[in-house]
Image (cartoon, rainbow, N blue to C red):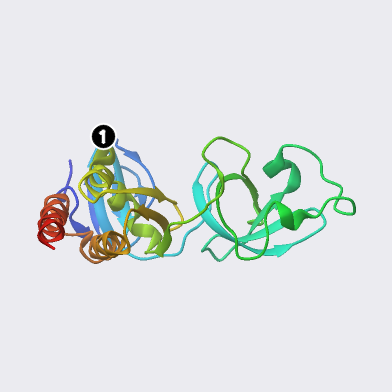
Amino acid sequence: MILVQNRELVIPGQKIAEGKYKIKEGVYKEGDEIFAAVVGLAEISDETIKVIPLEGRYIPKEGDLVIGVVIDVHAWGWVVDINSPYTGNLLFSDYLERKVDPVRENPHKHLTLGDVVALQVKEVNERKYVLLEGGKAGLGRLRGGRMVEISPMKIPRVRGKKGSMLKVLQDIGGCRLLVGQNGRIVIWAKTPERTAVIVEALKRIEREAHIPGLTDRIRLMLEGRNVKDAET
């Protein structure tokens, strides 16, 4: 028996359901009773229950796409800020897919301090040592665009159900987005004005993620800005 509405705001200790449901992050179970573990939005689908936290830092998980910034270069590879309490470690072999002799080959020609890079979390051990990889298609150093940071907890809302919000942002907003699970988003738009509109939309999603009907409101906002652009 479900005791709350889908996407209802819940608080820690609040009973969400009773019965044999599958549970994911943000909840815990005592017998057949399921409780919220964090302040967030209850999400109930396909007999699965979880709570999406309203606030929190990014905690890396294997397989996550992250957008990082190179903050150090070593003889073995690079240290990457991934907007988390834990830094990421990128080995030469996991980025270039070959061995590098740092004495003979300058690693800075591949990645250097301040570079923005799309990577995947390869492994996280029990001591939170984060190993990254970047040799796959779609990963690597990012060029151009503007990077924006929002709460990592709001990234699922930026994507939307089955990608609905992301489609609105890109199709109506006239841009291309790369969304990192760690709360960083890179925007490629044709003009600075268009980029500014998308930044505004992302910040609005961050503020209003808990309010129903957000996708429609963002669509209307972007359509309105399209009209203004055409008139100027």
- Residue 3 percent across, percent down from the top left: 16, 49
Residue 18 visible at all: no
Q: Amino acid at mark 1?
A: Glu
Q: Residue at x 55, y 60 (%)?
A: 82
- Residue 77 percent across, percent down from the top left: 75, 53
User: Crowdedness of circle 1 by 10 Å Cα count: few (<14), some, many (20+)?
Assistant: few
Furthest toward the right, the residue is 103
The answer to which of 6 and 135 lies nearer the viewer is: 135
- Residue 185 percent across, percent down from the top left: 40, 56
| Callout 1 secondary element | loop
The answer to which of 60 and 93 lies nearer the viewer is: 93
The residue wearing badge 1 is 47
User: Which quadrant is the N terminus positioned in?
Assistant: top left
- Marks counted in the figure total 1
Q: Residue at x 77, y 37 (%)?
A: 98
Residue 3 visible at all: yes
Q: Is residue 218 left or right of residue 61?
A: left
Q: Residue at x 51, y 51 (%)?
A: 66
Q: Residue at x 17, y 47 (%)?
A: 6
The answer to which of 77 and 160 lies nearer the viewer is: 77
Residue 123, quarter of the rendered image: top right
The answer to which of 34 and 79 lies nearer the viewer is: 79
User: Which quadrant is the C terminus positioned in?
Assistant: bottom left
Q: Is residue 192 above or below residue 5?
A: below
Residue 229, quarter of the rendered image: bottom left
- Residue 221 percent across, percent down from the top left: 13, 58
